[in-house]
Image (cartoon, rainbow, N blue to C red):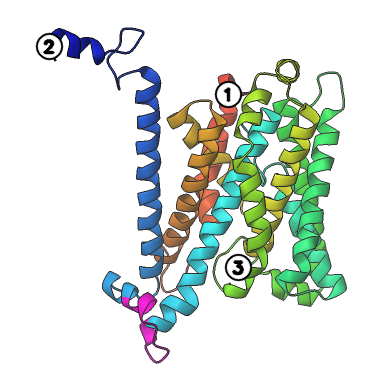
Amino acid sequence: MPASVAASAARTPDGGRAGTHPHVRRRRRLVTGFVVAAVLLVAVSVLSLMVGARTIAPADVVHALLHYDGSDADALVIVDSRLPRTLLGLAAGLGLGLAGTVMQGLSRNPLADPGILGVNFGASLAVVVAIALLGVTAPSGYLWFAFAGAALASALVYTVSSLGREGATPVKLAITGAAVSAALSSLIIAVELTSRTSLDAMRFWQVGSLAGRGFGVLWQVLPTLAVGAVLALGLGRLLNGLALGDDVARGLGQRVGVTRALCGIAIVLLCGSATAAVGPIAFAGLIVPHIARRVVGADYRWILAYSAVVAPTLLLGCDILGRVVAPPGELQVGVVLALVGAPVFIALVRRRRMVSL
Protein backbone atom coordinates (compact mmCIF):
# COMPACT_ATOMS: atom_id res chain seq x y z
CA MET A 1 0.00 0.00 0.00
CA PRO A 2 1.42 3.45 -0.92
CA ALA A 3 2.54 5.61 1.98
CA SER A 4 -0.05 8.30 1.19
CA VAL A 5 -2.89 5.76 1.25
CA ALA A 6 -1.66 4.25 4.54
CA ALA A 7 -1.46 7.71 6.10
CA SER A 8 -4.97 8.49 4.90
CA ALA A 9 -6.30 5.21 6.34
CA ALA A 10 -4.69 5.98 9.66
CA ARG A 11 -6.73 9.14 9.99
CA THR A 12 -10.18 9.41 11.55
CA PRO A 13 -13.06 11.12 9.68
CA ASP A 14 -12.47 14.39 11.57
CA GLY A 15 -8.85 14.57 10.43
CA GLY A 16 -7.19 13.20 13.55
CA ARG A 17 -5.05 10.12 13.62
CA ALA A 18 -6.60 6.81 14.66
CA GLY A 19 -6.25 6.18 18.36
CA THR A 20 -5.53 9.87 19.15
CA HIS A 21 -9.11 11.14 19.30
CA PRO A 22 -9.65 13.12 22.56
CA HIS A 23 -12.36 10.72 23.73
CA VAL A 24 -10.12 7.73 23.09
CA ARG A 25 -7.20 9.33 24.94
CA ARG A 26 -9.44 10.28 27.85
CA ARG A 27 -10.86 6.78 28.15
CA ARG A 28 -7.38 5.27 28.07
CA ARG A 29 -6.26 7.70 30.79
CA LEU A 30 -9.26 6.87 32.96
CA VAL A 31 -8.80 3.12 32.53
CA THR A 32 -5.11 3.42 33.32
CA GLY A 33 -5.87 5.46 36.43
CA PHE A 34 -8.46 2.93 37.55
CA VAL A 35 -5.97 0.07 37.13
CA VAL A 36 -3.39 2.00 39.17
CA ALA A 37 -5.97 2.62 41.90
CA ALA A 38 -6.91 -1.08 41.91
CA VAL A 39 -3.26 -2.11 42.22
CA LEU A 40 -2.86 0.33 45.12
CA LEU A 41 -5.91 -1.21 46.79
CA VAL A 42 -4.39 -4.69 46.48
CA ALA A 43 -1.11 -3.42 47.95
CA VAL A 44 -2.88 -1.79 50.91
CA SER A 45 -4.88 -4.99 51.48
CA VAL A 46 -1.68 -7.02 51.63
CA LEU A 47 -0.19 -4.50 54.08
CA SER A 48 -3.31 -4.83 56.21
CA LEU A 49 -2.59 -8.56 56.50
CA MET A 50 1.09 -7.95 57.29
CA VAL A 51 1.09 -5.00 59.70
CA GLY A 52 0.02 -5.06 63.32
CA ALA A 53 1.40 -5.69 66.78
CA ARG A 54 3.63 -8.21 65.00
CA THR A 55 4.75 -7.70 61.42
CA ILE A 56 4.50 -10.81 59.25
CA ALA A 57 6.47 -11.31 56.04
CA PRO A 58 4.55 -11.39 52.72
CA ALA A 59 5.63 -14.97 52.04
CA ASP A 60 4.20 -16.08 55.38
CA VAL A 61 0.95 -14.25 54.62
CA VAL A 62 0.58 -16.08 51.29
CA HIS A 63 1.43 -19.41 52.90
CA ALA A 64 -1.13 -18.88 55.67
CA LEU A 65 -3.85 -18.04 53.16
CA LEU A 66 -3.11 -20.96 50.86
CA HIS A 67 -2.13 -23.55 53.48
CA TYR A 68 -3.95 -22.71 56.69
CA ASP A 69 -2.57 -24.47 59.77
CA GLY A 70 -4.45 -23.94 63.02
CA SER A 71 -1.35 -24.77 65.04
CA ASP A 72 0.67 -21.96 63.42
CA ALA A 73 0.56 -18.70 65.39
CA ASP A 74 1.06 -16.54 62.29
CA ALA A 75 -1.72 -18.34 60.46
CA LEU A 76 -4.10 -17.77 63.37
CA VAL A 77 -3.31 -14.06 63.43
CA ILE A 78 -3.70 -13.66 59.67
CA VAL A 79 -6.76 -15.80 58.98
CA ASP A 80 -8.73 -15.41 62.21
CA SER A 81 -7.98 -11.75 62.98
CA ARG A 82 -6.51 -9.69 60.15
CA LEU A 83 -8.32 -11.30 57.20
CA PRO A 84 -11.87 -10.56 58.43
CA ARG A 85 -10.71 -7.10 59.49
CA THR A 86 -9.33 -6.42 56.02
CA LEU A 87 -12.38 -7.79 54.20
CA LEU A 88 -14.67 -5.76 56.43
CA GLY A 89 -12.60 -2.65 55.71
CA LEU A 90 -12.97 -3.29 51.99
CA ALA A 91 -16.73 -3.75 52.30
CA ALA A 92 -17.33 -0.77 54.61
CA GLY A 93 -15.08 1.50 52.55
CA LEU A 94 -16.92 0.51 49.38
CA GLY A 95 -20.27 1.26 51.03
CA LEU A 96 -19.29 4.61 52.52
CA GLY A 97 -17.53 5.81 49.36
CA LEU A 98 -20.45 4.97 47.08
CA ALA A 99 -22.99 6.36 49.56
CA GLY A 100 -21.14 9.67 49.75
CA THR A 101 -20.88 9.91 45.97
CA VAL A 102 -24.58 9.19 45.45
CA MET A 103 -25.50 11.64 48.20
CA GLN A 104 -23.41 14.42 46.65
CA GLY A 105 -24.88 13.75 43.22
CA LEU A 106 -28.44 13.57 44.52
CA SER A 107 -28.25 16.81 46.49
CA ARG A 108 -25.75 18.54 44.16
CA ASN A 109 -23.93 19.39 47.38
CA PRO A 110 -20.14 18.91 47.58
CA LEU A 111 -20.37 18.86 51.40
CA ALA A 112 -22.78 15.94 51.53
CA ASP A 113 -21.54 12.94 53.51
CA PRO A 114 -23.33 10.19 55.42
CA GLY A 115 -21.52 11.22 58.59
CA ILE A 116 -21.86 14.98 58.25
CA LEU A 117 -25.53 14.92 57.24
CA GLY A 118 -26.53 12.77 60.20
CA VAL A 119 -27.27 9.53 58.34
CA ASN A 120 -24.68 7.49 60.23
CA PHE A 121 -25.72 9.00 63.57
CA GLY A 122 -29.33 8.06 62.85
CA ALA A 123 -28.27 4.48 62.24
CA SER A 124 -26.12 4.58 65.39
CA LEU A 125 -28.95 5.82 67.58
CA ALA A 126 -31.25 3.09 66.30
CA VAL A 127 -28.61 0.45 67.04
CA VAL A 128 -27.98 1.83 70.54
CA VAL A 129 -31.70 1.81 71.32
CA ALA A 130 -32.00 -1.76 70.02
CA ILE A 131 -29.14 -2.90 72.26
CA ALA A 132 -30.21 -0.97 75.37
CA LEU A 133 -33.97 -1.45 75.29
CA LEU A 134 -34.50 -4.65 73.31
CA GLY A 135 -31.39 -6.60 74.18
CA VAL A 136 -30.39 -7.05 70.54
CA THR A 137 -26.66 -7.75 70.32
CA ALA A 138 -26.16 -9.66 67.04
CA PRO A 139 -25.56 -7.75 63.78
CA SER A 140 -28.32 -9.79 62.18
CA GLY A 141 -30.71 -8.24 64.69
CA TYR A 142 -29.69 -4.61 64.79
CA LEU A 143 -28.93 -4.37 61.05
CA TRP A 144 -32.58 -3.58 60.37
CA PHE A 145 -32.58 -0.94 63.10
CA ALA A 146 -29.56 0.64 61.40
CA PHE A 147 -31.48 0.78 58.12
CA ALA A 148 -34.49 2.39 59.81
CA GLY A 149 -32.35 4.93 61.65
CA ALA A 150 -30.46 5.88 58.49
CA ALA A 151 -33.72 6.35 56.56
CA LEU A 152 -35.36 8.47 59.28
CA ALA A 153 -32.29 10.67 59.72
CA SER A 154 -32.05 11.23 55.95
CA ALA A 155 -35.72 12.19 55.75
CA LEU A 156 -35.41 14.53 58.75
CA VAL A 157 -32.37 16.39 57.42
CA TYR A 158 -33.82 16.81 53.94
CA THR A 159 -37.25 17.89 55.23
CA VAL A 160 -35.89 20.51 57.63
CA SER A 161 -33.40 21.90 55.09
CA SER A 162 -36.17 22.13 52.47
CA LEU A 163 -38.17 24.58 54.57
CA GLY A 164 -38.05 28.17 53.39
CA ARG A 165 -38.00 29.92 50.05
CA GLU A 166 -34.69 28.62 48.70
CA GLY A 167 -35.27 24.95 49.46
CA ALA A 168 -32.54 22.50 50.38
CA THR A 169 -29.45 24.52 49.46
CA PRO A 170 -25.98 23.04 50.08
CA VAL A 171 -25.31 25.36 53.02
CA LYS A 172 -28.68 24.61 54.63
CA LEU A 173 -28.12 20.88 54.20
CA ALA A 174 -24.69 21.12 55.87
CA ILE A 175 -26.00 23.22 58.77
CA THR A 176 -29.08 21.04 59.27
CA GLY A 177 -26.99 17.88 59.08
CA ALA A 178 -24.56 19.22 61.68
CA ALA A 179 -27.44 20.15 64.00
CA VAL A 180 -29.16 16.78 63.60
CA SER A 181 -25.84 14.97 64.10
CA ALA A 182 -25.22 16.87 67.33
CA ALA A 183 -28.73 16.12 68.61
CA LEU A 184 -28.51 12.44 67.73
CA SER A 185 -25.05 12.20 69.27
CA SER A 186 -26.41 13.63 72.53
CA LEU A 187 -29.24 11.09 72.53
CA ILE A 188 -26.76 8.28 71.92
CA ILE A 189 -24.69 9.37 74.92
CA ALA A 190 -27.81 9.67 77.07
CA VAL A 191 -28.91 6.13 76.23
CA GLU A 192 -25.44 4.74 76.88
CA LEU A 193 -25.19 6.43 80.27
CA THR A 194 -28.45 4.87 81.38
CA SER A 195 -27.57 1.38 80.18
CA ARG A 196 -24.34 -0.34 81.22
CA THR A 197 -24.98 -3.10 78.67
CA SER A 198 -25.18 -0.70 75.75
CA LEU A 199 -22.18 1.27 77.04
CA ASP A 200 -20.00 -1.85 77.11
CA ALA A 201 -21.25 -3.02 73.72
CA MET A 202 -20.88 0.36 72.05
CA ARG A 203 -17.64 1.60 73.60
CA PHE A 204 -15.43 0.83 70.60
CA TRP A 205 -18.15 0.49 67.99
CA GLN A 206 -19.23 4.10 68.49
CA VAL A 207 -15.91 5.62 67.40
CA GLY A 208 -15.80 3.48 64.26
CA SER A 209 -13.54 0.46 64.33
CA LEU A 210 -12.54 -2.54 62.26
CA ALA A 211 -10.96 -4.34 65.22
CA GLY A 212 -12.68 -7.24 66.91
CA ARG A 213 -15.03 -8.03 64.03
CA GLY A 214 -15.18 -11.58 62.78
CA PHE A 215 -16.43 -13.24 59.65
CA GLY A 216 -19.92 -13.45 61.18
CA VAL A 217 -20.37 -9.67 61.02
CA LEU A 218 -19.17 -9.59 57.41
CA TRP A 219 -21.56 -12.32 56.26
CA GLN A 220 -24.50 -10.60 57.96
CA VAL A 221 -24.07 -7.26 56.18
CA LEU A 222 -22.63 -8.48 52.88
CA PRO A 223 -25.96 -9.23 51.08
CA THR A 224 -27.51 -5.81 51.69
CA LEU A 225 -24.19 -4.08 51.06
CA ALA A 226 -23.82 -5.89 47.74
CA VAL A 227 -27.34 -4.94 46.66
CA GLY A 228 -26.72 -1.30 47.58
CA ALA A 229 -23.37 -1.26 45.75
CA VAL A 230 -24.80 -2.73 42.54
CA LEU A 231 -27.67 -0.24 42.67
CA ALA A 232 -25.33 2.70 43.29
CA LEU A 233 -22.95 1.73 40.48
CA GLY A 234 -25.91 1.64 38.10
CA LEU A 235 -26.97 5.21 38.92
CA GLY A 236 -24.18 6.95 36.99
CA ARG A 237 -26.24 8.08 34.00
CA LEU A 238 -29.14 9.15 36.20
CA LEU A 239 -26.87 11.23 38.43
CA ASN A 240 -25.39 12.85 35.31
CA GLY A 241 -28.93 13.88 34.38
CA LEU A 242 -29.65 15.30 37.85
CA ALA A 243 -26.42 17.31 37.66
CA LEU A 244 -28.00 19.30 34.81
CA GLY A 245 -30.96 20.27 37.00
CA ASP A 246 -34.37 18.71 37.53
CA ASP A 247 -36.01 20.56 34.64
CA VAL A 248 -33.35 19.56 32.14
CA ALA A 249 -33.41 15.98 33.42
CA ARG A 250 -37.18 15.82 32.92
CA GLY A 251 -36.77 17.29 29.46
CA LEU A 252 -34.39 14.47 28.62
CA GLY A 253 -37.05 11.96 29.61
CA GLN A 254 -35.70 11.10 33.05
CA ARG A 255 -38.16 10.33 35.83
CA VAL A 256 -36.65 12.47 38.57
CA GLY A 257 -38.86 11.10 41.34
CA VAL A 258 -37.88 7.52 40.57
CA THR A 259 -34.22 8.52 40.39
CA ARG A 260 -34.36 10.17 43.82
CA ALA A 261 -36.09 7.11 45.28
CA LEU A 262 -33.43 4.76 43.87
CA CYS A 263 -30.67 6.99 45.22
CA GLY A 264 -32.32 7.05 48.64
CA ILE A 265 -32.60 3.26 48.71
CA ALA A 266 -28.94 2.87 47.75
CA ILE A 267 -27.83 5.34 50.44
CA VAL A 268 -29.86 3.65 53.17
CA LEU A 269 -28.64 0.16 52.21
CA LEU A 270 -25.00 1.23 52.03
CA CYS A 271 -24.95 3.43 55.14
CA GLY A 272 -27.05 1.04 57.19
CA SER A 273 -24.85 -1.93 56.33
CA ALA A 274 -21.54 -0.14 56.86
CA THR A 275 -22.63 1.50 60.11
CA ALA A 276 -24.06 -1.71 61.54
CA ALA A 277 -20.78 -3.47 60.78
CA VAL A 278 -18.09 -0.99 61.83
CA GLY A 279 -19.84 1.91 63.53
CA PRO A 280 -20.32 5.52 62.41
CA ILE A 281 -17.27 6.50 60.35
CA ALA A 282 -17.37 10.05 59.04
CA PHE A 283 -15.51 11.81 56.20
CA ALA A 284 -14.88 8.74 54.00
CA GLY A 285 -17.92 9.60 51.90
CA LEU A 286 -16.89 13.26 51.81
CA ILE A 287 -13.25 13.01 50.76
CA VAL A 288 -13.33 10.19 48.24
CA PRO A 289 -15.80 11.66 45.68
CA HIS A 290 -13.69 14.81 45.47
CA ILE A 291 -10.54 12.78 44.89
CA ALA A 292 -12.30 10.89 42.12
CA ARG A 293 -13.81 14.06 40.66
CA ARG A 294 -10.38 15.70 40.35
CA VAL A 295 -9.18 12.74 38.28
CA VAL A 296 -12.20 11.91 36.09
CA GLY A 297 -14.16 15.16 35.87
CA ALA A 298 -17.95 15.39 36.23
CA ASP A 299 -19.01 12.01 34.81
CA TYR A 300 -20.64 10.12 37.68
CA ARG A 301 -20.18 6.79 35.94
CA TRP A 302 -16.45 7.13 36.43
CA ILE A 303 -16.73 8.93 39.79
CA LEU A 304 -18.68 5.98 41.20
CA ALA A 305 -16.20 3.46 39.79
CA TYR A 306 -13.20 5.31 41.21
CA SER A 307 -14.93 5.87 44.57
CA ALA A 308 -15.57 2.13 44.86
CA VAL A 309 -11.80 1.55 44.73
CA VAL A 310 -10.37 4.66 46.43
CA ALA A 311 -12.64 4.57 49.50
CA PRO A 312 -11.57 1.08 50.69
CA THR A 313 -7.94 2.09 50.08
CA LEU A 314 -8.36 5.18 52.26
CA LEU A 315 -10.16 3.29 55.03
CA LEU A 316 -7.63 0.46 55.16
CA GLY A 317 -4.76 2.94 54.96
CA CYS A 318 -6.09 4.83 57.98
CA ASP A 319 -6.62 1.53 59.81
CA ILE A 320 -3.00 0.51 59.17
CA LEU A 321 -1.81 3.93 60.32
CA GLY A 322 -3.82 3.57 63.51
CA ARG A 323 -2.10 0.26 64.27
CA VAL A 324 1.44 1.67 64.14
CA VAL A 325 1.22 5.19 65.60
CA ALA A 326 0.58 4.19 69.23
CA PRO A 327 2.24 0.84 69.97
CA PRO A 328 1.55 -1.49 71.70
CA GLY A 329 -2.05 -0.21 71.43
CA GLU A 330 -3.78 1.27 68.40
CA LEU A 331 -6.05 4.12 67.35
CA GLN A 332 -9.43 3.20 65.93
CA VAL A 333 -9.90 3.89 62.24
CA GLY A 334 -12.73 6.35 62.91
CA VAL A 335 -10.38 8.56 64.92
CA VAL A 336 -7.60 8.48 62.32
CA LEU A 337 -10.00 9.17 59.46
CA ALA A 338 -11.51 12.10 61.36
CA LEU A 339 -8.05 13.61 61.81
CA VAL A 340 -7.50 13.28 58.06
CA GLY A 341 -10.97 14.36 56.99
CA ALA A 342 -11.60 17.39 59.21
CA PRO A 343 -9.03 19.65 57.48
CA VAL A 344 -10.39 18.60 54.08
CA PHE A 345 -13.95 19.44 55.15
CA ILE A 346 -12.86 22.89 56.35
CA ALA A 347 -11.06 23.51 53.06
CA LEU A 348 -14.16 22.51 51.07
CA VAL A 349 -16.39 24.83 53.09
CA ARG A 350 -14.03 27.74 52.45
CA ARG A 351 -13.94 27.21 48.67
CA ARG A 352 -16.90 29.23 47.40
CA ARG A 353 -16.73 27.87 43.90
CA MET A 354 -17.55 24.39 45.26
CA VAL A 355 -20.72 25.40 47.10
CA SER A 356 -22.78 23.45 44.57
CA LEU A 357 -22.15 20.77 41.98
Secondary structure under badge 3? Answer: helix
Query: What residue is shown with label 2?
Result: 3
Q: Is residue 40 visible?
A: yes
Identify the image quadrant of residue 237: top right
- Extent of the magenta region: 63-74
Lateral position of residue 63 relative to residue 285, left or right: left
Of label 2 and label 3, which has the lower sequence position? Answer: 2
- Residue 36 is labelled as none
Camera sees residue 188: no
Residue drawn at 77 percent across, 27 percent down? 255
Mark 3 neighbour class, 10 Å CA radius: few under 14, some 14 to 19, many 20 or more: many
Which image quadrant: the N terminus? top left
In this picture, is 209 found above or below 18?
below
Give the label on residue 218, or none.
3
The amino acid sitting under disc 2 is: Ala
Residue 207 higher or lower than 156, as above or below: below
- Which residue appears at 80% of the width and 48% of the height? 151
Question: Which corner quadrant of the image does residue 20 belong to?
Answer: top left
Q: Please tell me whether mark 2 or mark 1 is closer to you in this view.
A: 2
Q: Position of residue 132 (x, y in %)?
A: 83, 71
The answer to whether the residues at label 2 and label 1 have Cβ atoms under 8 Å apart is no
Residue identifier under label 1:
354
Q: Within the magenta stretch, is there residue 353?
A: no
Q: Camera-side residue: 70 or 153?
A: 70
